[in-house]
Image: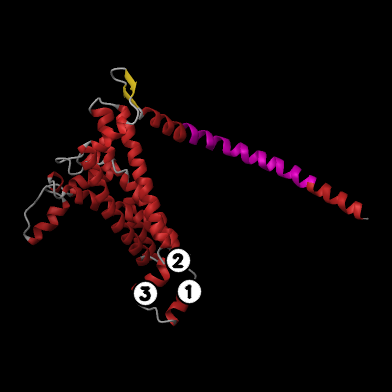
Amino acid sequence: MDSNVYENKKINVGDKKKRKDPERLTGIVFIIPLMFFITVFTFFPAFYSFAISLFHYNPFFHSIYFVGASNYMDVIRDPAFIRALINVLIYTAVVVTVQTFLAFGYALLFNTASRISRIARAIVFIPAVVSPVSMSIIFIWVFSDTGLVNYFLSFFGIPPHNWLFSTTYAFPAIMAMNIFTTAPYFMIVYSAGLQSIPSEIMDAAKIDGLKSGIKRFRYIYFPLMRFSTILVVILGLTGAMQLFDQIYVITDGGPARATYVPLMYIYNRTFVYVGDIGLAAAASFVLFVIIMILTVTQRKVITDRR
């Protein structure tokens, strides 16, 4: 009797393995195209760029020779790159902070199932779906001499000013544009997080006396939406550190490098100055390391904060 049971178990295990083999094979078949795509368009370019960063490489004059870490030292010592890095760090600190709080405010404001709330949420979300280049062209007019900003300021007797040609106001204008266009995108993340909070928790909070918005944020929203905040901050940080298209369209890094950022430095070293692609690749990896350090640090800070 026992031997029959044992034989039946062996047969059942064998049947399960036979059923799993086709499933495993199907999974492998489906994942091969994705792995091929990632390998060709992500891993290979990354390894190739790192290899190029160790060479002086100028394809326009067919000049290439090994320089080792010299490119990295040149990038770190270059005042133009240092200026670009300082600019983008200031930009990241301001934009990521403001857009995170604004996105959360949008989510709280439109966290209802009413038709008015849905329509308002859709209107607010429109800037997030407009291409950055199109939005940049619109904001060139908004901040021009005859633009929308100067039109409203004229009601207060303030004379017109060309904001984008000012070393003081050009970068804040671009910050305002990016906050305006990215906060609605992150609003969706927070909206999903708010809707996932059980109503029982909010009812219990009201009973316990957590009626003020600050206390609810401190003891309800922040702990339960910590991972939503991590996602928003990481996406905002990586996007801000890779700022390029708006700068390229609106100011081209000017005036007087007031809006110069690392990707403009990399672009100019590669195409504008007919320079060293190896140096540009080294700058790319320096920027990658900085983004990685900032991402890991902010995630640890948000996760460990209780």
Residue 159 is drawn in which quadrant? Answer: bottom left
Neighbour class for label 2 at 10 Å: few (<14), some, many (≥20)?
A: some
Q: Secondary structure at mark 2?
A: helix
On screen, 241 above or below 112? above
Sort mark 1 into few (<14), some (14-19) or many (20+) by Cα contacts within 10 Å: few
Residue 240 belongs to magenta span: no
The alpha-carbon separation of the residues under discs 3 and 2 comes to 13 Å
**Looking at the picture, how far across and down is residue 96, in whole percent?**
31, 54
- Residue at 13% in and 44% down: 165
Nearest the eye: 69 or 283? 69
The amino acid type of the residue labelled 3 equals Lys
232 sits to left or right of 160: right
| Mark 3, residue position | 215
User: From the viewer's perspective, is residue 104 above or below residue 45?
Assistant: below
Q: Residues under labels 1 and 2: Cα distance?
A: 10 Å
Q: Amino acid at mark 1?
A: Ile
Q: Tell me the mark number nearer the camera, choosing from 3 and 1.
A: 3
The answer to whether the residues at label 3 and label 2 have Cβ atoms under 8 Å apart is no
Q: Mark 1 = which residue?
A: 201
The reply to whether discs 1 and 2 touch (Cβ–Cβ < 8 Å) is: yes
Comparing labels 1 and 2, the label whose residue is closer to the camera: 2
User: Is residue 171 toward the left or the right of residue 306 in the image?
Assistant: left
Which quarter of the rendering shows the C terminus? bottom left
Residue 15 seen in the figure:
yes
Instruction: Residue type at mark 2: give it.
Output: Leu
Where residue 14 sits: x, y (%)? 79, 45
Tell me how far mark 3 sits from mark 1, CA to CA. 14 Å
User: Looking at the image, is mark 3 or mark 2 earlier in the sequence?
Assistant: 3
270 with respect to 6 (left or right): left
Extent of the magenta region: 14-40
Who comes first in sequence, dot 3 or dot 1? 1
